[in-house]
Image (spheres, coloured by chain):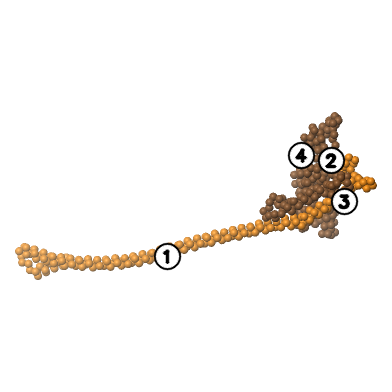
Amino acid sequence: MAIDTIDLELAGSCVDDGGSAIGMPQLCDAWFANQIFWLIVALVAIFLILTRIALPRVSAVLAERSGTISNDLAAAEDLKRQATEAEAAYEKALTDARAEAQRISGEARAAIKADLDAAIAVADEKIGAKAAESEKQITEIRAGAAASVAQVARDVASEIVTALGGKADAATVNAAVDARVKGN
Amino acid sequence: MPKPPLNNRAQVRRTMGTTEVSILVFFAVVIVALIVISVLFSVEGESELAFHPMDQFMIKPLFGEYGDPVYWYTVTNLTFWMALAVLCVVLMFVLGTRGRAIVPGRSQSVAELTYGFVFKMVEDVTGKEAVKFFPYIFTLFLFILFANFVALIPTSASPTSQITVTAFLALAVFLTVTVVGFVKNGMKFLGLFWVSSAPLALRPILAIIELISYFVRPVSHSIRLAGNIMAGHAVIKVFAGFAAITAIAPVSVLAITAIFGLEVLVAFIQAYVFTILTCVYLKDALHPSH
């Protein structure tokens, strides 16, 4: 019975007959030790969980994430630089190709011009030769024609003289025709 | 409302200002109506109203008979709800971050955001060199936050409504701040009380005021938290007591719902306020000059 009384006192110093609180239960000093003990247990538990497991893990994840982000940004920067370089190379290749094309076309033009000049020269030469030959032939023909004219004139003159009943003296006719032809 | 320090005071006022005033006006009206109705009912002699709003703060052994003695090691209802708060920390920070994903899922995001929230608070308010106190401050924040929130479950016992608990937390902060202040600054820590920017004649008077305000800190720090949580829970209990009267029950339920919503806000804000005040006090210890 004595023990029961002490127990009731421990439990009931802040509790009335009906089991309700007397005043503010928070101020019941019989419960202070219990509250503080379990509070310390809870705080130590949370502190250990945080410092042993949670905080290192979270900060590692955050650090890893920021590392990943900065790595990715650096990689993106690198790729961008590469793209710029590729573009510059492309531009350069394009310019080179254009210059090459210009050079090739210039060369071709020069070659064609040279060929053309040569051909023209050959042709000119041929034309000149042909012209000279024609000239010669014309001269020959002309000379031939003049000779024929004198012959024909001689013949015609002797025939006319004969037809007119005269006596065609060959020497006289020739002299007369030559004189006339020369006179021309 | 308590007075949070510095620029956060304005922020808290913005959050709570109009909402709180309108809710308080509403409840003043409701309470008056309830009193009038209950008086009417008691005149008719039907009332069986019994208010025991403080009973919920009693410490009871979790196992065994009600009325068994509570020794310092006895597992009580308070132990159970503190354990739930610890379990919440485990769920959020151990299970939640188990994946260690670079792109976090939902639970990991919450854990990371909470971490970032408190870390930034410590860094901004107290300074970069206070980061080594972060686990300590984060422990306080998480314990108070989860204790407040699990205490919103009906039939709970709320650890943070016990002045003993909050007084222990506040005294721990007070002693830490004082010890750190003297260890870091030596006797220069006393400069905290000597306002060198004030006229010389005023300084002794200000020193007395500063000294008093310094020693009142743990009192206001602890009673603010316990008082807020206790008041909210007691008010809910009072309204619940009115529900015994059939005619008032719907109003009572509505009132409990509204108060409960307010208590959800208070649960977070009080954890925030306690933590940021800890940071402010710690800043005094690290940079005592005015």
Mark linked to residue B53: 2
Residue A134 sits in quarter: bottom left
Q: Nearer the viewer, residue B215 or A6?
A: A6
Q: Secondary structure at mark 3?
A: loop
**Residue B48 in the figure: left or right of residue A90:** right
Q: Is residue A79 visible?
A: yes
Q: Nearer the viewer, mark 1 or mark 2?
A: 2
Kindly report the distance in space between the C-alpha atoms of the residues bearing marks 1 and 2: 108 Å
Residue furthest to the bottom: A171
At a point 93% along the width and 48% down the height, the residue shown is A3
Whether callout 1 and callout 2 share a subunit is answered no
Q: Secondary structure at mark 1?
A: helix
Q: Nearer the viewer, mark 2 or mark 3?
A: 3
Mark linked to residue B257: 4
Whether callout 2 and callout 3 share a subunit is answered yes
Mark linked to residue B72: 3
The quadrant of the rendering that contains the C terminus of chain A is: bottom left
- Residue B117, position in %: x, y? 73, 51
Mark linked to residue B161: none
Dot 4 or dot 3: first in sequence order is: 3
Whether callout 1 and callout 3 share a subunit is answered no
Which amino acid lies under the numbered mark 3 shown in the image of this protein?
Trp
Dot 2 or dot 3: first in sequence order is: 2
**Residue B274 in the figure: left or right of residue A88:** right
Whether callout 4 and callout 2 share a subunit is answered yes
At a point 78% along the width and 39% down the height, the residue shown is B256
Residue B30 sits in quarter: top right
Q: Nearer the viewer, mark 1 or mark 4?
A: 4
